[in-house]
Image (tube, rainbow, N blue to C red):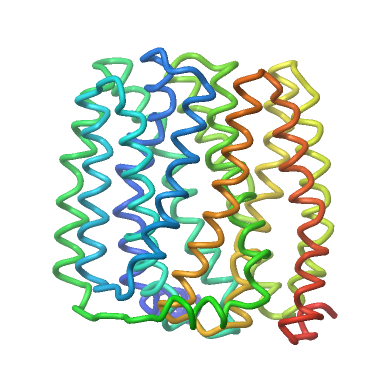
Amino acid sequence: MAQSVHAILQYFKHLESGHSLISLINIPNAIGLSFASLYFKSQGLPIFKIIIVWAISPAVAMLVVSLVRSYSIRTFLCIGILLYAMKALTLFFYFKYSYLLYGMLAGLVLGIFWVALNYIFFSRSPSANHAKNSSVYFIIPSLLGIILPPVGALIIGYTNFKVLFALVVLLSPISLGYVLKKIPAQIAVFNFRDSHRRFKGLKLITGFEGALHFFQSVFIPVYILLFLTSEFEVGGFHSYTAFIGFIVTVILAKYSDKQQKRLVVIAPLLIAMGVVILLLGAIHQVWWWLMLIGVYSFLDNITLPIRFAIPMDFKGKDIGFWAMSEFYGNFGRTVLLALSAVFFYFNAYWLAFIIFALIALFYPSVINYQIKRNLHKPLLTS
């Protein structure tokens, strides 16, 4: 027993700076910014414009990645934390175009903060632990997502939205202090053209993954606003989806690392996800829909670390890799969410579900094709 505890502590020590920073940055995110879409709706913003917020975000991130040529890791992490605080301030001092400014700031966070954080989190991750480390990367926000949204809902219920957003701003110095104390100063340089060339075989895979990742984290929380109206309902929904698959995630990721058979593990689950997405677009009874989203969340949560690990299996995890990963992942998100905004404007929600379902259904074939054609690592397909 003591040896097992020691092994766990050593494992987390290996990822110390990464998982600590993810925990710190996701506290204000889970407790406060997860209610941004609900706040936009409370201010009278139509659902299709809320989707536009989240389409602007990845588009701006792509622009950032295409312009930046070096990442001063500690500086960029600090800038990212300040951008989180600025996002909260746009909600606190809400005005007519706050939603557009919020989307642009969120894009700067993606292109600046998360590229730098991914780099330090996975810089020492061996191939044998890609999926397991990815599960830790995602499971910390999931744990906070279970606990904190109901706390945020209570703060809104007993005070108001502005108190909650002020709290987000006040929590930011904690993360800032951690970065300044724990993250060493380093500069990571990359060449966009060379990194783009070396990313061959992963562009479409990453685009599919980026789009599919935003289905649960962005699309569904906006779509559910058609049915849920109070902060307690929305907070409970965030906790519900975060809880599903929490434990199974680590178990399946560990198995995938041990067997190194990524596609065999996730292919049937991705196909099942595609079927569930189609059903989500067809079912309109709220309780049946919520039960089905639980099934989808389970499938998404247990496959996400493996999906995230696949690109790392084939390429070096330098800053150029993470820049390209962010660029093409956000390309997929921009396209899918822009189309979704159009469908939402015309109340043709089912068309958005069909496109996301097709992404999930064809995802395994895209991975298999790229492995055989461009990536040349047959171990993962057997």
Along the horizontal axis of the image, is 177 left or right of 325? left
Depicted 92 relative to depicted 193: above or below:
above
Q: Tell me the residue at 51%/75% (across/down).
A: 1
Q: Give x and y (percent) for residue 205.
A: 67, 65
Depicted 363 relative to depicted 279: above or below:
below
Along the horizontal axis of the image, is 295 left or right of 130? right
Q: Give x and y (percent) for residue 74.
A: 22, 70
Along the horizontal axis of the image, is 175 left or right of 293? left
Observer able to see residue 208: yes
Along the horizontal axis of the image, is 218 left or right of 160? right
Q: Tell me the residue at 25%/23% (across/down).
A: 94
Quadrant in the rendering for residue 66 = bottom left
Depth check: 346 or 17 in front? Answer: 346
Observer able to see residue 251: no
Q: Give x and y (percent) for residue 297.
A: 65, 43
Depth check: 201 or 275 in front? Answer: 201
Depth check: 369 or 67 in front? Answer: 67
Q: Tell me the residue at 38%/37% (across/down).
A: 148
Q: How many marks?
A: 0
Quadrant in the rendering for residue 350 = top right
Q: Give x and y (percent) for residue 263.
A: 78, 69
Depicted 141 relative to depicted 102: above or below:
below
Q: Tell me the residue at 34%/68% (across/down).
A: 116
Quarter of the figure with the C terminus:
bottom right
